[in-house]
Amino acid sequence: MGFHLNQRLLLVILTAAAAAAAEEQKCPTKCGNVNIPFPFGLTELCSLNTSFIITCNKTLSQPIPFLKIDPKVRVLDISLDGQLHVSLPVATSCVNNTIGESEDENWLFEFKLKPFHLSSKQNKLTVLGGDAAGVVYDQGSRSGRLYITTACVSVYSGLDKEPTNDESCSGTFCCETPIQQRLSEFYIYSANIIINNFTKSFQSYPCGYTFLVKDGAYNFSMTHLINFNRTNTFPVVLDWAVGNTCIDAQKNASSYACKSKYSECHNAIVGPGYHCKCSTGFQGNPYLPHGCQDVDECTEESDDCLKGRSTCSNDPEGSYTCLCPKGYEGDGKINGSGCVIRSNRKIIIAFSVSGSILALLGGTLFVCCTLKKRKLNRLKEHFFQLNGGQLLQQQIGRYSGSNELTKIFTVEELKDATHNFSEEMVLGAGGEGTVYKGILPDNRTVAIKKSRISNPNQIEHFINEVILLCQINHRNVVKLLGCCLETEVPLLVYEFVPHGTVYDHLHDQTKSLRLTWKRRLQIAVETSGALAYLHSATNAPIVHRDVKTSNILLDHNLTAKVSDFGASKIIPLDRSQLTTLVMGTLGYLDPQYFHSSQLTEKSDVYSFGVVLVELLTGEKALSFERPEAHRNLAVHFHSSMNEGGLLNIVDSRIIDEANVEQLTDVANIARHCLRLKGEERPTMREVAMELEGINTVEKHQWEKVNLSSEETETLLKATPSSSFSVDGVNRRSMHSGSDTLNRIISLSLTSGR
């Protein structure tokens, strides 16, 4: 027991001696350009204990500090708030292109940093390479076994042509994942994943790189895969603290680390230990006996003394006083009693009190109004930035040739228009937000969409919808009138389309208008024309990505208008497809896009094919009321067509009025749109031309088909023709004037501008 007491006494003496030596500046406090504040030090005598010793490597042109407990860890910055910024080496694994074996020796690094820990929420594990993996193992468990705490895999894109633009670190060539555990003893491991196409992957990118980095301190670039310098360093945040808890430490004054008289102890927010901080009115190093120095408020002009009437006097105990001049009395402060003449005290007090009250009331009112106005402006500016205002400005700059927003509305204007967003004004609600009916001061009726954004990542979808709608000017696309970014959630103002959605009128008996076959065909023609315009008549092809009957609105003339562009994407002119996260609605979603994540214009063609079938059959795109094998309308349609049963699935509400040949032709178009392979589907322009041709025949009565009921059933049960042509209208109802008709149809596609 005596031996242990002597050890403890020696430790206390060394700690006190180290603090005293550091304060007397007998210890060096810099290594290169890095400050080394106590409790850290460059020697044992100058540090709190051996764990806080910093080794200064002076062999290089610029001295570099490292942790003595692990010389692989370079120190970048030391904060007395309990954080240590360091950099760790990059684990590298390279593969021999011919045999697929690792050739690099720096594939595994072991770190023993106790008592320091990786910050649990400020660091990320990042992996670069094609088909590379990185793992963090925890070796600090009591069982002695290694546990995987964090892992990340970056994969080869699989594209024939490598992308030329920088990509986000989202799994392709680069992946990153947060470090969720506080680790002090761990391994960083890098490996290559050998798969069937490793030859192509590793010939281009033979090496994988794994490293820890502070969140936000690394931005991925494709050039890093080729020019990555494995000696690069990235900041990593470690947590540090001293002792166990404040209560335990304060029981023994000699070992208590908060040496300054004007310091306070605070338990560490995360993990064991405590930190020392200077008291209010003091600043400096609380771990040194005289480290916390008084802040002279008078010099820094942070006092509230009456300027020109009282004198500020600093108190070395951390405060200050305001001294009134000779012949006056009071506290000398702006918000206090001020300085008053001692003579005629009662009268002066009465006038002073009255004047002070009036001045206080007036000043308070003025300050409140000013502060409220400033707060409101700051709040509006905050919401403007939060809702993507800067991103919106950048995007508008990129598309300088497009129309700018018609109007930027204030939140007060939209509150008045919607009776403060009353529930009575709600037109509909969905996953993307709520739509309100509003009446502007000029008596225009509008639809106001309040987006439902739960995290910053969804801001991009909102800005995407604004930018897309600014570029679109088509009679069959809902028109954007303006937006408001001053609220917690962004608002979009559209033209009001009064008759709801096609989905409602097909499936909701309480809201439905009777959609005749003629009207359904017109809806198909107008919708296909709008989609063809998006694909081929804009500056760059726009893929809607969520074509469905609930996104097709009907105005007062029952004219179709395509809406909801929150999920839409612009495909650059130099690319035919985009790799994206799969978005869309089940039942309408392109199977090829669903499985490959490769978005093309043909994905909209498939979704429009489902819309055509929905118009033909009056059935929902996905219904659990149908047998399991036919729950998906596209599958049900294909099955019925293959069995020659078109008559059995056509909506009974239109079967008696529809031209049978038109039904057959439209079904044939839908069948081509629903082909599983995108390259076998027609373009939206070709679909629009075909539908316009069918509709033109009906309007001009070029040919009337009168069939007996027996002929009707025979035609409907026949297998639809597979002669859908992309070069011209290929139907029996078209005569030798088809070339002229094609020219008419081609012109009609751009008539909406």
Image (cartoon, rainbow, N blue to C red):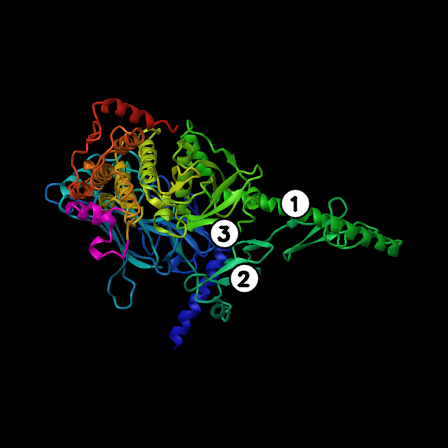
Q: How crowded is mark 3: few (under 14 residues within 10 Å), some or many (20 or more)?
A: few
Whether residue 217 appears in this view of the structure is no
| Left-right relation of 426 to 175 | right
Residue located farthest toward the front when viewing the structure as drawn: 708
Mark 1 neighbour density, 10 Å: few (under 14) some (14–19) many (20 or more): few
In this orientation, which residue lies closer to the viewer: 619 or 43? 619
- Report the magenta stretch's main SS: helix
Up/down of 572 relative to 497, above or below: above
Q: Quadrant of residue 128?
A: top left
Task: Give x and y (percent) for residue 49.
Answer: 41, 60
Query: In this rendering, would 658 be left or right of 385?
Result: left
Q: How far apart are marks 2 and 1 (CA)?
A: 37 Å
In percent of width and height, residue 2 lies at 40, 76
Q: Nearer the viewer, residue 753 or 85?
A: 753
Give the spatial CA distance, label 2 vs label 3: 23 Å
Amino acid of disc 2 = Glu
In percent of width and height, residue 535 lies at: 31, 33
- The segment highlighted magenta reads 623-650
Q: What residue type is labelled 3?
A: Gln
Quarter of the picture containing the C terminus is top left
Residue 25 is labelled as: 3
